[in-house]
Amino acid sequence: KPGPAPANTGAVNSAESLATLALWTAQRGADAGSYGIGGALVESATGRVLQTMPNRVFRTLSAGGPFVDDPTAHGERQLMSWYLAQREALGLVSPGELTVVTTLDPCLMCASALLTVGVNVGVIAIDDYSGVNYDSSGSFEDLPEPLRGQAKATFGYYAVDGGRAGQGSRAIAYADQPITSDTLDACGTTYTTSADQVRSARRASGATPATLP
């Protein structure tokens, strides 16, 4: 089961409280047998939390290991789908007034969804394997224009106490506040540990190559 929820999952008042909410969401994904990545959609000016979403690519059956439930069910993509579906009914604010905070730098699919909708994106941990800012340069050279310029204007990477400086957009929620190194490390560890577990379980499931026709 997931660890204890933050004291308030309906509102945040600092970069650290927002990061720990995203981390708790990521742990929900890991505990469900998927990748430990998660995100939260918040009103940038108020800290009001509209929705949280963990990675749901994999689902674990009661008997057997994880199976692919939805390969597109990354947290950031799901948050954008939820926002577009609920914006009018709930009277939600415009995309430019929102921040999606994610525990791991978005992949190209999620970055495309975030850029298409037009929200601000606050990132905690870097993903040097498949993240859109894999080289930590903030240049987004693999994106074509005008998406590259848009990413530079809307993607921000939180400063870390005693560690890296902030990078990118200052329009993200609590852009001028740092997060703790413990939270940064936990976001990275939650992902890598869960990814190792998913891959190990997948390798151990199904028929061995020797038995295939």
Image: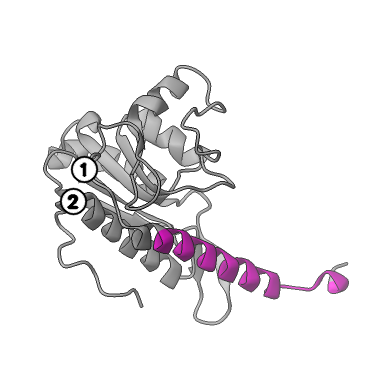
* Residue 8 coordinates in the image, percent (x, y): 15, 63
Kind of residue sitting beneath label 2 = Ser
Answer with mark 1 or mark 2, whichever residue precedes in sequence.
2
**Image-quadrant location for residue 87:** top left
* Residue 66 coordinates in the image, percent (x, y): 55, 70
* Residue 89 coordinates in the image, percent (x, y): 16, 40
Residue drawn at the location 36% of the way across and 78% of the way down? 1
Q: CA distance from mark 1 to mark 2?
A: 6 Å
Residue drawn at the location 36% of the way across and 58% of the way down? 181
Is label 1 in a helix, a strand or a loop?
loop
In the rendered view, tell whether residue 199 sits above or below residue 37: below
- Left or right of 98: which side holds 152? right
- Work out which quarter of the rendered image holds the C terminus and state it: bottom right
Q: What label does residue 14 carry, if any? A: 2
Q: Main secondary structure of the magenta part?
A: helix
- On whether residue 196 falls in the magenta region, the answer is yes
Report the magenta residues as a range.
Answer: 185-211
Residue drawn at the location 50% of the way across and 29% of the way down? 140
Q: Which residue is mark 1?
A: 174
In the rendered view, tell whether residue 108 sits above or below residue 191: above
Whether the residues at callouts 1 and 2 have beta carbons within 8 Å, the answer is yes
- On whether residue 195 falls in the magenta region, the answer is yes
